[in-house]
Image (cartoon, rainbow, N blue to C red):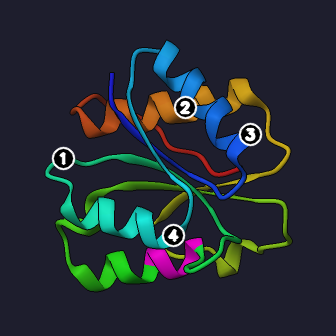
Amino acid sequence: MGNVLVVDDDADIRDLLVSVFDAEGHRVASAGDGAQALEFLTRAHEAWVVLLDILMPRMSGLEVCAHLVDEGPAAACHRVVLMTASQLGETERPALARALLRKPFDLDAVVELVGRLARELTGGAAEIWVK
């Protein structure tokens, strides 16, 4: 399977997603805020599927995306999925973000999306969709 980084300041959501993707056979890591996520991703030697909450302390998910783009192609290779309960419009979605998931989300849809993105990272064909 693939590498999945779960980034959310809500520990319950973070723990749920970590458990689900661990059970699916993914290599899973987590971060509680955007600054931790950015540090992790800029040091990563492999591409990750990143489930990234937008509204977090220290650094928002949108700021994480902007910093990853600034870091260059190596950092921008990650597959970012933004998660939010707020009203972010499609036109506000950063180019780096491959999808936008509205909270509360359908867990089966998240699993399917992450599977597609993970296959894309490992060279398999994947059709990516945005909700």
Mark 2 or 1, nearer chain start: 2
Task: Give x and y (percent) for residue 64.
Answer: 46, 75
Which residue type does callout 4 highlight?
A: Gly
Q: Mark 3: which secondary structure? A: helix
Q: Which residue is mark 2?
A: 18
Gap in angstroms between the C-alphas marked 2 and 1 = 18 Å
* Pointer 4 local density, CA inside 10 Å: few below 14, some 14–19, many at least 20: many
> Looking at the image, which is closer to me, 87 or 90?
87
Mark 3 or 1, nearer chain start: 3
Mark 4 or 2, nearer chain start: 2
Depicted 81 relative to depicted 20: above or below: below
Q: Residue at x 40, y 15 (%)?
A: 25
Which residue type does callout 2 highlight?
A: Val
Task: Give x and y (percent) for residue 36.
Answer: 43, 65
Read off the magenta span.
Answer: 61-65
Which residue type does callout 1 highlight?
A: Glu
Q: Mark 2: which secondary structure? A: helix
Which residue type does callout 3 highlight?
A: Asp
Q: Which residue is mark 4?
A: 34
Q: Mark 4: which secondary structure? A: helix
Depicted 23 relative to depicted 29: above or below: above
Question: Quick one: quadrant of the N terminus?
Answer: top left
Depicted 27 relative to depicted 82: above or below: above
